[in-house]
Amino acid sequence: MRTTAPRPGPASLTGYGRLLLVAVALIGAVLGSVLAAAAPADAHAALTGSDPKQGAVVDKAPAQVSLSFSEKVAMSDGSVRVLDPAGKRVDTGKTSDLGSNAYGVKLKPGLPDGTFTVAYQVVSADSHPISGAFTFSIGAPSDTKVSLSDQEVGGGLVGALYGFARYISYAGFTIVVGGAAFVLGCWQRGAGVRPLQRLVVGGWLSLTGATLVMLLLRAPYTGSGKLGDAFDLAKLGDVLQTKTGAALVSRLLLLAAAALFIAVLFGAYERREDAKEKRDLAFGLAIGGSVVAIGIAATWALAEHASTGIQAGIAMPVDVLHLLAVAAWLGGLAALLLCLYRAPMIDAGAVRRFSRVAFASVVTLAATGLYQSWRQVGSWTALVETRYGQLLLVKIGLVVVLVGIASVSRRWTGRIAGEAGGMAPEAAAAAVVEQRTSTKKKKPVAVAHSSKTGVSAEVEIAEGKGGGGGSGKSTGGKGADSKADGQDKRSAQLARQQAAMDSAREKRIRDADPHRSGLRRSVFAEAGVAVVLLAVTTILTSTEPGRTEEEAKNASSTSAQQPAGPVKIKIPFDTGGQDGKGAVRLELTPGRTGSNDLHVFANRPNGSAFDIPEVKVSFTLKSKDLGPLPVAPDRIATGHWSASGVQIPMAGKWQVKVTVRTSDIDQVTLDKNVQIG
């Protein structure tokens, strides 16, 4: 049984189809304009603290400026600039990693009083550039001549081109993986269908071209924002040293392997006639293609969202599975839609098999998407109040609509399957047409049935049953050659006429089948919604996750509510041995995020200095799963230990643990929670 479909044209789109096309275009335009307006807000790491703090007024010039982020960032020399009130740089230009997602840049000595500007431009661990600026003052605030560009990093023309290339790369991956899977898993005869071949090859070309564009645009996208820097070989070399650059290069290498897979699928495999050879080759292609598809999907997982944040070891394979499920569903949907409109005929069994694949993909998407949503959003508040959460709600709504339309397609598929078993009149007619077409392919000429043009006589002549004046003898000379040429032209003309008649008759049969028309409309609707869904998904990949945004807000509000000041705590101890009682007193100055000085004092019960052998301190922020951050202070006097440069990466309720050893065998660990920052 074959499921047939007409070629698309103005007549093949019903009023319903045209209305849907317009609706999808409008939805895409509205979403595109809204999301493009907010595109420069790309940021997946957030500044959670600094030392000095934003707007702070310090008595003397600090030795360095430190910045703390919600996740690890890539920072090079010059990523942080400190400018004096006149706009002159006063930093040394050398940035250092202070640990715990904190980074610092040292300042030149002898800074005057006034307001200083700190500008930073870094790349978060999930490949997205972020930038910003804040001020602090020495002595007293003053006027400043510093003027920073209003355009955020990742915006402008370069940002728009990079975002478009990202969308094309997702679409290309979906089409090439889903289309190839559709051929191997649902309709192996499709390997010889030219429109399907063009679809998969077009997906490969789109993904390859978009990856090359992203690789070239990476330097200006994360740096200057100037399009000309895309062709700077030095900057391209720097990009290749980054995690994102390595992922893009790996994707290009895997795409070379994918090109070989496509060549075999639509070449050697399609030409195989032996059933066993074809089955063995299909198995090999399925294994090799799966490995290549997993590898390409992993280039996203290893460089973007899944590679950072909580549970990265689980999130990356889940992200790969999510991408493959999307490709199998939406890419297969594109292949099915193309076959329904462009392929001469498609097996009803192929439609049923794809229906099962789509159902399995939807179940996988639901499971992996639920986990990803929890990981990236984290709370109901972030789901509603953050831009990431709002976009996620839009995506969920589109998926629900898509699943609803898919259920309609499944009903049409069921009707077609039932019709195939009972050989409905339309199916029988299509089978007759197919049989007649295949029979004619074996003959050198076509058979026409028009009495008005003298077809019978012409066919007899073409088949050698008549000719040469009806005598069957060759007359020779130019007359015979001329007559033979005329007969050949007439036969060719009749063959073309008959082919057109057969094509028109097949089209009438296909158009008369309401089940297939219904399936085409529902699949067309699915594809339209899928285009918009893919656009929203692409925007989500360049939007700050709700969990990160909410954590940054909380850190900012906590920092604003808790004024910086020295943190002082006193903890009594008893190690259990002889002369093992006393108390330790800790002073953390200035007691805020960034660099601090720690002083530890040990005293006996009578208040005198206690010269104990060893003291250790650690800081743990349990709410953020950060720490313990160990500190080993140096002994500077009897009962007095000190450590400088103690980094507190973010504000919060920290657990301070102190280990006191009074002898070789007697020690105790004490802890106390305290607000820092």
Image (cartoon, rainbow, N blue to C red):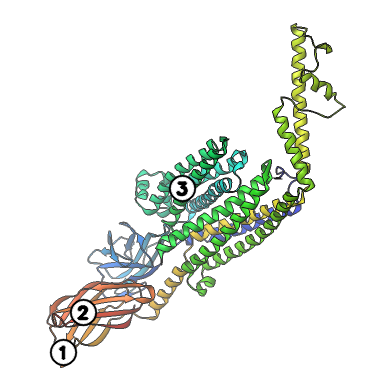
Q: Nearer the viewer, residue 294 or 80?
A: 294
Q: Is residue 552 above or below residue 666?
A: above
How far apart are the two marked residues, 2 and 3, measured between alpha carbons?
A: 57 Å
Residue 210 at least partly seen: no
Q: Residues within 10 Å of mark 2 (few under 14, many from 20)?
A: some
Residue found at the far right of this picture: 452
**Residue 611, position as x, y percentages in the image:** 12, 83
* Residue matched to label 3: 292
Q: Which quadrant would residue 594 be assigned to in this image?
A: bottom left
Q: Nearer the viewer, residue 511 or 624?
A: 511
Residue found at the far front of this picture: 276
Quadrant location, the C terminus: bottom left
Direction from residue 234 to residue 358 in the image, left or right: right
* Residue matched to label 1: 604
Q: Nearer the viewer, residue 319 or 425?
A: 425
* Residue matched to label 2: 599
* Amino acid marked by disc 2: His
Direction from residue 564 to residue 5 in the image, left or right: right
